[in-house]
Structures are given as structure tokens and as C-alpha cells.
Amino acid sequence: MKKITLLLSLFLFTGLLFAQSEQTQKPATIAEQTIVYPNPVESLNPVNVTLPLGVEVKAVSFVKMNGWELISWSRVNQNQQQLRLSLPEMSTGVHAVRLELKKGGFITKKLLVVR
């Protein structure tokens, strides 16, 4: 009888811990909350960037996957949650949108350019 009670107690305890661990999720990072769309995008069409509340951008650049910077903007309206960026004519393929944050650090998002 003691073994059954012990096993039942252990089962209930571990089930309780498992249920609690599923409910406590870590908050999403700033990079996870930043959205770049449409993706894929057609060359010469604008790209939209949605930022989380309170995040200010210092500069934005489009970078090829080999590291070459195609275009950058250092004058960005820093208090906006929504940025609309005009793309230059770009070759098709995978590129990156790199956001330099005012408080330091970078957010890099992949962007697929199609024709």
C-alpha cells in the first residue's frame, strides 16, 4: 500500500510540475517580435517593418548575404512602430534587413527578393 501511495504522490507531483512549466513561457525577444513583410517581396516594392513598443531604430540597411551593404538609412523616424522602406532594384535571392537599435545592438531579418 505504501508503494502505491508513494507512486501516486510522485505522479501527482511530477504532473503538477509539468503543468506549471508549460504555463510559464519566456517572453518573446525583441527580434522575435519584429516583423518584416511582405516576405518574399518583389524588387522595387516597399518593405514594411513592425517593431515592438518602445524599440527605437537608429539606422536601417539592406545587406546581401555576402556582407555587402546595398543601401542604408541613418535618418529613421525613431518613434514609429511601423517603418516603410523603399527597395532599390535588387537581384533576386536572399538578402537581410539589418536594424541598428538606438539603445545598442542589431536585429537582422532575412528577406527573399523575387521578380
Image: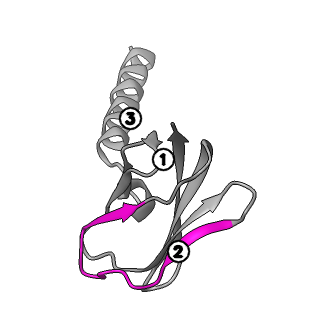
Image-quadrant location for residue 26: bottom left
Q: Earlier in the sequence, mark 1 or mark 2?
A: 1
User: For the point 62% across and 47% down, which residue is it?
Assistant: 91
**Marks 1, 2: nearer the viewer:** 1
- What is the secondary structure assignment of the residue under circle 1? loop
- The residue carrying mark 3 is 18
Amino acid type, mark 2: Ser
Closer-to-camera residue (31/75): 75
Closer-to-camera residue (19/33): 33
Amino acid type, mark 3: Phe
**Marks 3, 1: nearer the viewer:** 1
Image-quadrant location for residue 17: top left
- Residue 14 vertical position relative to residue 90 in the rendered view, above or below: above
Alpha carbons under labels 2 and 3: distance apart: 47 Å
Q: Quadrant of the N terminus?
A: top left
- The residue carrying mark 2 is 72
Residue 112 in magenta stretch: no
Decide if residue 2 is on the left or right side of residue 113.
left
Alpha carbons under labels 1 and 2: distance apart: 16 Å
Label 2 close to label 3 by CB (< 8 Å): no
Question: Crowdedness of circle 1 by 10 Å Cα count: few (<14), some, many (20+)?
Answer: some
Marks counted in the figure total: 3
- Residue 8 vertical position relative to residue 81 in the rendered view, above or below: above
- The residue carrying mark 1 is 43
